[in-house]
Amino acid sequence: MGRSLFLFAAALISMLLGIATAQDQNHSQREAKQVALWAAISVPQPIFGEGGTAKLTINFGVVNDGTSTVNPKIGLSHLSINGVEPKDWPIVINNGLRSSESEALPPGHFLSFGYQLGPRYFAKPGVYTVRWWSDNFRAAPITFRVLPDKR
């Protein structure tokens, strides 16, 4: 009885070690496949006057800090303004010329582009917090203000 209990315990420990090793390998493979994209958005200034947003451009940037080519999924990205995604955002972000790197960004390369969004999304006075993200990146939010016209 003692010997069979010992053999059973040894087999159980061996099996558990095998499972732990397989889990560690799966975790390492998942980490290797993780995307290493850095993203940011910006505006040219923190304060605008009402009626002064006609040329307000939001600049977008993504850098591939990883070791493999990645699709940043720009066309599937989301933009939220004060917590609400504009209904026409998918049309806006998929409009315009794109390089081949927009869908296959090599390691160490970056994308940088801008959209004039002022009159469309920021015409009214207020404080605006803007966020931009996709499945593969998340930019830090930005905040700026549009002041009312004093005339």
Image (cartoon, rainbow, N blue to C red):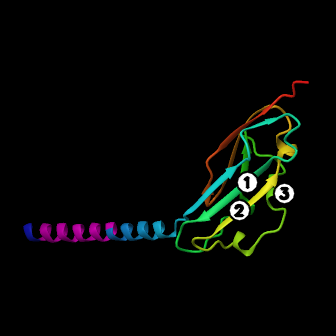
Q: In this view of the protein, which residue sits in the foreground, 52 or 14?
A: 52
The answer to which quarter of the image holds residue 18 is bottom left
Residue 106 vs 126, above or below: the answer is: below
Secondary structure under tag 1 reads strand
Q: Which residue is mark 2?
A: 112
Q: Position of residue 49 (x, y in %)?
A: 83, 34
Q: Tell me which residue sits at (84%, 51%) in the image.
A: 88
Q: Are marks 1 and 2 in contact (CB under 8 Å)?
A: yes
Q: In this view of the protein, which residue sits in the foreground, 87 or 51?
A: 51
Q: Residues within 10 Å of mark 2 (few under 14, many from 20)?
A: few
| Magenta span includes 17 | yes
Q: Which segment did they paint magenta?
A: 4-20
Secondary structure under tag 3 reads helix
Give, as a three-letter code, the residue at label 1. Asn
Q: Earlier in the sequence, mark 1 or mark 2?
A: 1
- Residue 91, disc: 3
Secondary structure character of the magenta stretch overall: helix
Left or right of 151: which side holds 94?
left
Q: Are marks 3 and 1 in contact (CB under 8 Å)?
A: no
Q: Earlier in the sequence, mark 2 or mark 3?
A: 3
Q: Tell me which residue sits at (47%, 70%) in the image.
A: 32
**Furthest-top residue in this view:** 151
Q: Position of residue 96 (x, y in %)?
A: 84, 64
Q: Earlier in the sequence, mark 3 or mark 1?
A: 1
Give, as a three-letter code, the residue at label 2. Ser
